[in-house]
């Protein structure tokens, strides 16, 4: 059976909007972690899959995250025929105030591992 991605939306700690394209049979949630001006880290759940799992995940995991405001767009695709992947972390460097670049991490979680 063909697996079609769904589209979801979320907002981060700074109020930036994101569009998420995800596979509903694998993705449980996406968290965004960034370093604040104070130097402390802040983690927020960006998106939580509203659907319950109905099917076993397929062998390929695909997720796209984009934010027009931040000029951010990436897609990950991972082959996982054995179903062993539980979490994927993507580290980005986005422009901050004054032109400096700030680290922003996205944790893409299947909900089966510990959170």
Image: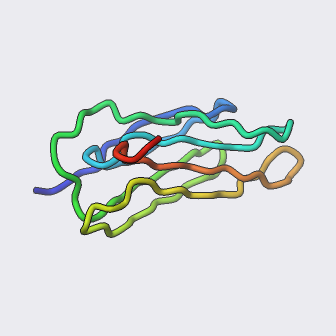
Q: Does residue 96 appear left or right of residue 49 in this picture?
A: right
Give 75 or 36, whichever is nearer the viewer. 36
The x and y percentages for residue 103 are: 72, 53
In the figure, residue 85 lies in which quadrant? Answer: bottom left
Q: Is residue 74 left or right of residue 99?
A: left
Residue 20 location (% of width, % of height): 44, 44
Q: Residue at x 57, y 45 (%)?
A: 67
Above or below 34: residue 58: below
- Colour setup of the view: rainbow
Location of the N terminus by quadrant is bottom left
- Is 38 drawn above or below residue 90 in the view shown? above
Report whether 59 appears left or right of 89.
left
Q: Residue at x 73, y 40 (%)?
A: 41
Please provide percent x and percent y for residue 68.
59, 45
The residue located at (39%, 54%) in the rendering is 86
Residue at far left of view: 1
Q: Position of residue 93 (x, y in %)?
A: 71, 57
Q: Residue at x 52, y 59 (%)?
A: 74
Q: Is residue 97 above or below residue 91?
A: above
């Amino acid at each position: 059976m063909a697996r079609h991605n769904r589209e979801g939306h979320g907002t981060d700690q700074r109020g930036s909007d994101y569009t998420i394209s995800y596979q509903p049979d694998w993705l449980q949630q996406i968290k965004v972690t960034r370093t604040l001006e104070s130097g402390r880290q802040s983690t927020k759940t960006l998106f939580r899959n509203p659907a319950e799992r109905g099917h076993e995940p397929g062998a390929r995991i695909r997720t796209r995250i984009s934010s027009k405001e931040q000029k951010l767009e990436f897609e990950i695709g991972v082959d996982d025929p054995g179903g062993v992947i539980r979490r994927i972390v993507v580290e980005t460097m986005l422009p901050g105030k004054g032109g400096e670049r700030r680290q922003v991490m996205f944790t893409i979680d299947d909900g089966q591992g510990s959170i």
